[in-house]
Image: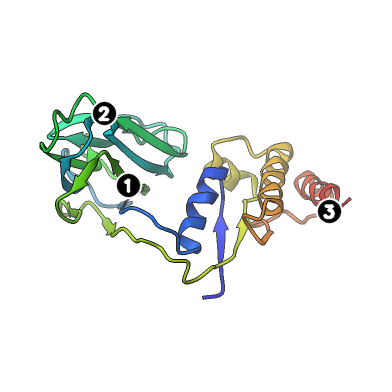
Amino acid sequence: MDGVIACYPRSEEEIDNARTYLNDGPHGPSLVVRLPRHAKLAAGASAVATATFTVNDASRAKLQFFWDDQNNSAERGQHEAFARVDGEIVWRQDIANEAVDRWINVNLAERVGGRNRRVQVEVGVISAEETSSDVVIRIDDIHVRGLRATGAWTSRADEGLGESTLTPPSPGGGRFHLPQILMPTAWPDEFEKRYGEPGTPANIAQRVKFCIEMAKKGKATGVTTWYTPKESGSAVFDAIAETFKGDSR
């Protein structure tokens, strides 16, 4: 592999998260769940990653992970991502919302008790009602601060939930450095689907400009667009062309 095309980047945090893996940086475990498009899910079906810890310093206890949800649906109440400590919900998020990617920090100081106490930490996704979706949820680079792991993370998924993958942590080491080219979509309908914003020429050009700025920072080696309208008089094409021209001046 010589590098990657990073499709539809939405934030600098998301790009930095990708660079951790592309540059063989240290990272925590990751749970990725792809809910099936055509299969009906039973209410209560779930995919969960679990680990057990001993409390070292309760005052520093924190659960931290990168949350990446690719769902722009307005159909709320169907699926929920969650984090639990000893069976108690400490974070939850309806995945039918604007597509988001951000770091989640959950303070556990008041929930884990005294030193040397054993606690169980879980992260996952649960189906709140019988439904079907085509959604990818990523609970990535999981870190539990102030606690010491007593074993490896494990995962389970109920039948019919789709694909569920638990990637183990890595100490990194910089053994490879793969470049990435950023590729925002320039097709208006696809733009609205991927970004949850109207696919206007100005909005599309702004996303292209953001990717160019990321490349200038050294976080990508280049920028291209997916499916740029090329017909004569296309306002989208003209806006993108002007963005690239303005950057080269």
Residue furthest toward the right? 249
**Circle 3: residue type:** Ser
Using the image, determine if residue 127 lies above or below residue 9: above
Q: Residue at x 23, y 39 (%)?
A: 127
**Circle 1: residue type:** Ile
Along the line of sight, the residue nearer the viewer: 143 or 42: 143
SS at circle 1: strand
Residue 140 shown left or right of residue 174 in the figure: left
Which label belongs to residue 59?
A: 2
Along the line of sight, the residue nearer the viewer: 32 or 113: 113
Whole-percent x, y for residue 1 in the image = 51, 75
Q: Tell me whether circle 1 and circle 2 mark residues in contact (CB < 8 Å).
A: no
- Mark closer to the chain start, 1 or 2: 2
Disc 1 to disc 2, C-alpha distance: 19 Å
- Mark closer to the chain start, 1 or 3: 1
SS at circle 2: helix
Can you tell which of label 2 and label 3 is closer to the viewer?
Answer: 2
Disc 2 to disc 3, C-alpha distance: 63 Å
